[in-house]
Image (cartoon, grey):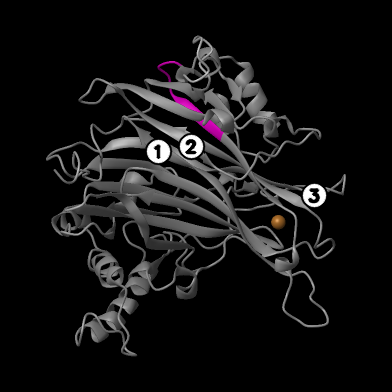
Amino acid sequence: MLRSTTHYLPTIPLVLVVCLLWPALAWGTSHSLDLNQKPDGGPYPPILADALVPLLGFASEGSETAAKSVIPAAPICALAQCDAKVYCSRQPNSACLLQTFKEIQWRICIHATRFGTASQQHSKGLGIGPVYMRNMVETGAPWRKILHEASLAELFTPYHERVGARYYDTQYLTWDSWQRTVTQDDAGREGALVTLAEDGDFGPTVVAECRDRGPAWLCKEDFEATIRRGQELALWGILETGNYDFITEYAFLDDGTIRMRVGATGYNDPHSPDEAHSHDALWRIDIDLDGARGDTAYLVRHVEPDPASPSPLLAVDEHVLFNGGIEGAAAWDPLAFASLLVEDQGVNALGNHRGYEIEPLRSGSARHFGGNEVWTTKDFWVTRYSRISTTWADNWSPPDTYLLPDIAEKQSLQNNDLVLWYFASAHHDPTDEDRENDPGVFGYGVTRTHWFGFELAPHDFFDYNPLGGPKRCGP
Ligand SMILES: [Cu+2]
């Protein structure tokens, strides 16, 4: 079903205003009596008022300046709307979000991906980009681009016991069929709902949550102790593919990290609810550190023992050109703590190239051996941005049909415009925890969320601990 596009509101969707103002009024009433008391008399979590009042208060034009002026003394979230016309030009069904933490600020476009044409539609669900970040500690620090676009390229669900069950979950998605609306129940007490620019008739499809992520660092000595708790803004929506609901999440941390995860939940295949299977995802990340050009890919590995040393006790860490500096792929080696690093030509104050690296979040590595499944045999793929990179999803086809021709060009991965592809999986062998609580039946039903993904973490992108860590605590 195609939804009307006549309700496109270029700066802030009307429904977004309504969604945001309603809770503002409700909380405003309760907070007018006692900021620390909710209507039933219990205490609010401290983050609630701090996180959401700025969000609601700055959901208006000119918010970039306004948001900057209300940076609180404590490190909390503050979400506002930026100008989608300027920052979300490639995908019109979008929202532009400005997230202000104590030390850094994020400018994020989130959008519903649309590929192909109106008559031959295709989608990969929610995507992000462009994404910019800037340091708020240093006066006048520039916005630095981190990535141009990132989304899922594919979701794949092969079952263990059925030769024919090789489900490419994005194959049948049209521009709208995958979307599901989200509610305050989805968002929780600390979340807000975002309606994309062309979804006024449909409703909100993105949850924005400010989350406390525990101790970001701490230091305790006999007579002195200090701690910094971390926060993150998590943006997530639902990619609905049938019995499974895939939660696609993009989280922006206050230390400059971007975390991308998929959570597989919903209900098990009714035809074979106890059959083991894997949930595979391929992400495409068009990384543009400080602009598109000048990026170089490396594989970073820990090697122990150091083969060049006579002692088995010594270790060494490698920082080598990815695939010798040309387009290609590599397996993730957990014994090497391997990561995929991209460095820009630009350097920080210490003369180190500003970089970001993919650090896997996963419990294992799937490998499959059917037709068109070569793309599942490696975890990191790096290509140069090229014609294939711009047409890879115009019409749906399995990843082998665009990824393999792309790396076959053997273009240079040094000082170039790079695209990263990351493959990860969750293995799901249903257990009794997958069953409904219906005594006498105990049939297989809804499954708990299986998460997998990665972090895109800063690597010499800052000059120092971005969360203000002191030299030490104590004397
Ligand atoms: Cu499953």
Query: Which one is nearer the viewer's eye here, 468 or 117?
Result: 468
Q: Quadrant of the C terminus?
A: top left
Earlier along the polypeptide chain: callout 3 or callout 1?
3
**Residue 138 in picture, x, y percent from top left:** 14, 39
**Splitting the image into 4 quarters, where does residue 341 fall?**
top left
Q: How far separated are the C-alphas under marks 3 and 1?
A: 33 Å
Residue 359's mark? 2
Please state if 202 lies on the left or on the right of 274 as rendered: left
Q: Which residue is mark 3?
A: 159
Q: Quadrant of the N terminus?
A: bottom right
Query: Which one is nearer the viewer's eye here, 166 or 217?
Result: 217
Q: Which residue is mark 1?
A: 457
Residue 256 sits above or below residue 225 on the image: above
Q: Circles 1 and 2: CB distance less than 8 Å?
A: yes
Earlier along the polypeptide chain: callout 2 or callout 3?
3
Q: Which residue does the image show at 24% across and 26% down from the upper left?
A: 348
Q: Which residue does the image show at 31% across and 75% down from the upper left?
A: 21
Crowd band around label 2 with a 10 angstrom C-alpha radius: few (<14), some (14–19), many (20+):
some
Disc 2 is placed on an element classified as: strand
**Identity of the amino acid at label 2?**
Glu
Furthest-bottom residue in this view: 40
**Identity of the amino acid at label 1?**
Ala
Residue 401 sits above or below residue 96 on the image: above
Disc 1 is placed on an element classified as: strand
**Identity of the amino acid at label 3?**
Tyr
Ligand 1 - quadrant of the structure image: bottom right
**Residue 472 in picture, x, y percent from top left:** 20, 41
Q: Which residue does the image show at 42% across and 26% down from the upper left?
A: 342
**Is residue 310 one of those drawn in magenta?**
no
Residues rendered magenta in the picture = 414-421
